[in-house]
Amino acid sequence: MPVFEQIIDRGHERVCFHHDPRTGLKAIIAIHNTTLGNALGGCRRWYYETEDDALYDVLRLSQGMTYKCAAAGLPVGGAKSLVMLPKPGHQATEAEARAMGRFVDTMRGTYIAAEDVGVTTQFVDWMAGETKHVMGGEKVSHGGDPSPHTAQGVFNSMKAALRHLGKSVDFKGLTVAIQGVGNVGHNLTRLLTQAGAKVIGADINQANVDRAVKDFKIEVVPVSEILTVKCDILSPCALGGVIDGHVAAKLRCQVVCPGANNVLDDPDEDAVILKSRGILYVPDFIANAGGVIHLAGLHVGYSDQQLAQKIADIEATALQVMGDAGQHTSTHAAAVALGDRKISEGAGKSRRREEMAAG
């Protein structure tokens, strides 16, 4: 599909491509919707086989951020950015980060960058040397690593799923399979094992697996088996698009509760397949909102108490979406409807403020 058709189809406001000749940086910023406020979303460093793949990813991710922020009741819009690596595992440098920071700064605050896959707190602090419009650093920027907060939101969503199914909200005796035991997956494993759950894990990075085994004594299975292992709850915490119709037909779990974004290849169709199989799907942009709540909340001035409450509220939001699913084709459709309502309400308030100012 041509670039403009993709942008129009997903309802984006602005998509910018950038090349920095000095460092070789190639990057994209996609601002999806600013109805509720300036748009916040992570900066991802990743290798893509083609530019089309990169564009497809950043458009999906930024659209998801709009719904994630809206459903969480945050006064920010949705966006995302990508640093396109020249080869897999390309080492990050301060020069690259600063070049990305200068690119972000050209948005003049309409886009606030944050940490994402392939980006560390150090990378964020390097970016912050060139722009004030970035969150998630520790020395120059602030907010730190959002993954513990993302994991807490996923854990809260799992509690909501158990409650919705009429089960005791108790993880003792439950088995949870986690695809990807990196930052989010590791923190989620900690919460689950502390609550008494058995965790089965897999990761393409052996160091992540070794750390999880050492810290939590998890059971390990090959990456090729983790999605279809028998468990009570499956939590994909790696990259997106891992569950399509073929995989959905082979799952052996009662609940899918993601820590990663866009885990369903085609959410409109795949969520219906999961529903037809009696598998409860907690929409990813509901379940994994804890990280963006933390960073966006700090950006707009929430107190620690307000941040903690917002992340705790993910449980109630997830429960609401699951309860509303009977009126929709799936839980995903119910979550999108919730996001649309929040965006529409925000647009209405904005128009009223403008009318009052003009009158």
Image (spheres, rainbow, N blue to C red):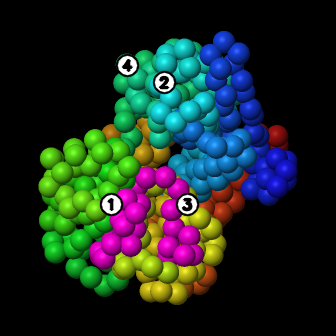
Q: Earlier in the sequence, mark 4 or mark 3?
A: 4
Question: Which mark lies nearer to you, 4 or 3?
Answer: 3
Q: Amino acid at mark 2?
A: Ala
Around disc 4, counting alpha carbons within 10 Å, would you say few (fewer than 14), some (14 to 19), or many (20 or more)?
some
From the image, tell me which residue sits under label 2.
Answer: 92
Q: Earlier in the sequence, mark 1 or mark 4?
A: 4
Residue 71 appears in the rendering: no
Location of residue 212 in the rendering, given as x and y in whole percent from the top left corner: 22, 49
First in sequence: mark 2 vs mark 1 = 2
From the image, tell me which residue sits under label 3: 241
Q: Which residues are magenta?
A: 222-248
- For residue 304, side relative to residue 271 (left or right): left
**Mark 1 to mark 4 CA distance (whole Å):** 38 Å
As measured in the structure, the alpha-carbon distance from the residue carrying label 4 to the one carrying label 2 is 18 Å
The residue indicated by pointer 4 is: 139
| Number of dots carrying numbers | 4
Q: Earlier in the sequence, mark 3 or mark 1?
A: 1
> Which residue: 41% across, 23% down?
122
Amino acid at circle 4: Lys
Q: Could you tell me the amino acid type at mark 1?
A: Pro
Eye-nearest disc, 3 or 1: 1
Seen at 28% across and 62% down, the residue is 221
Residue 242 lies, in percent from the top left, at 51, 62
| Marking on residue 222 | 1
Distance, label 2 to label 3, CA atoms, is 25 Å
- 238 magenta-colored: yes
Q: Amino acid at mark 3?
A: Gly
Q: Are marks 4 and 2 in contact (CB under 8 Å)?
A: no
